[in-house]
Image (cartoon, rainbow, N blue to C red):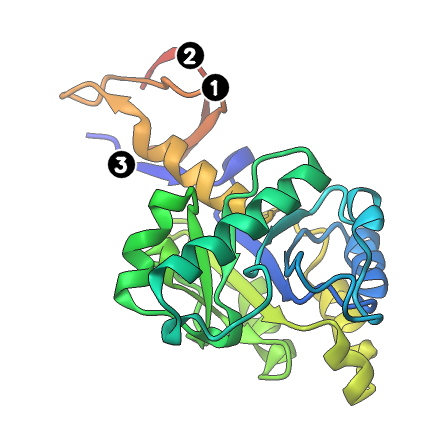
Amino acid sequence: MKTIYYCFPGGKHKVLTMSYDDGREEDRKLISIFNEYGIKGTFHLNSGLTEKDPKRIKPEEFPELYKGHEVSCHTYTHPTIERCPMEQIVRQVMDDRAELERIMGYPVRGLSYPNGSYSKEIIDLLPKLGIKYSRTVLTTNGFGMPDNFLEWKATCHHNRNLMELGEQFINLHKTQYLYMMYVWGHSYEFTNNNNWDLMENFCKLVGGKEDTWYATNIQIVDYMEVCDRLQFASDLSFVYNPSVQSAWLNVGGEIIEVKGGTQVSL
């Protein structure tokens, strides 16, 4: 019997994703670094604060600035939501979604918890509000896939062993695993700490690797759902992909693309 493994797009076994909160003016420089090295980021924005804080990126700049990356929710005004009534949490998430979708012109389906605040009740609520994932401020220092995308823990904050973990990540070579490096932070921290060279050096280190998929948060969630929807024959002789997007498999060492709407012999 051939061993079948799920792969990331293109048959890759590693993915890198970046996650930055609050939409401050330093996002411009951060995105320019990401774009130079082919890195993809998710930017979690509070649409209710853009006019109140002169240091935040203004909505009219969002579509062009964040092109090729992902705009995601961070609640409308950034309250510590675990202390809020559920009615307010619904408004905070849905008002933020609605405004960001009006600006960006696509469904906004992700979140990062403001102040890292959440609860089991909030996790249970989010799917009913159209939220597919949410990032915490907890970190693992590891490269595994999350058990629950609604309680998504990053590998590290960029001020915590970023280069050392980046070195470990690029040297991971066992293709029987799916590895993910997830970095989070706030772009203004680079200005506050005068360490923009840290992100420049990290992106230079990890960018342009043939074994790595560079993805936004929602791209990872959506792709794993494509894999989950694959329909395998009971004897694993073929697979049908009911999704639009391709899925990729490693079948006995051979990389196979299963295009959307097709059935492929294995």
Give the quadrant of the C terminus.
top left
Q: Is 155 situated left or right of 96 in this image?
A: left
Give the quadrant of the N terminus.
top left
The residue under the point 38% across, 70% down is: 118
Q: Is residue 244 visible?
A: yes
Q: Please tell me whether mark 1 sits on a helix, a strand or a loop.
A: loop
Task: Tell whether label 1 touches label 2 (CB within 8 Å).
Answer: yes
Marks 2 and 1, how far apart at CA: 6 Å
Q: Please tell me whether mark 3 sits on a helix, a strand or a loop.
A: loop
- Please give the label number shown on residue 3: 3
- Please give the label number shown on residue 244: 1
Q: Position of residue 37 (x, y in %)?
A: 78, 55
Please give the residue where the numbered disc 2 appears in the rendered image.
261
Marks 3 and 2, how far apart at CA: 23 Å
Could you say which is closer to the camera, residue 94 or residue 209?
94
Q: Please tell me whether mark 2 sits on a helix, a strand or a loop.
A: loop
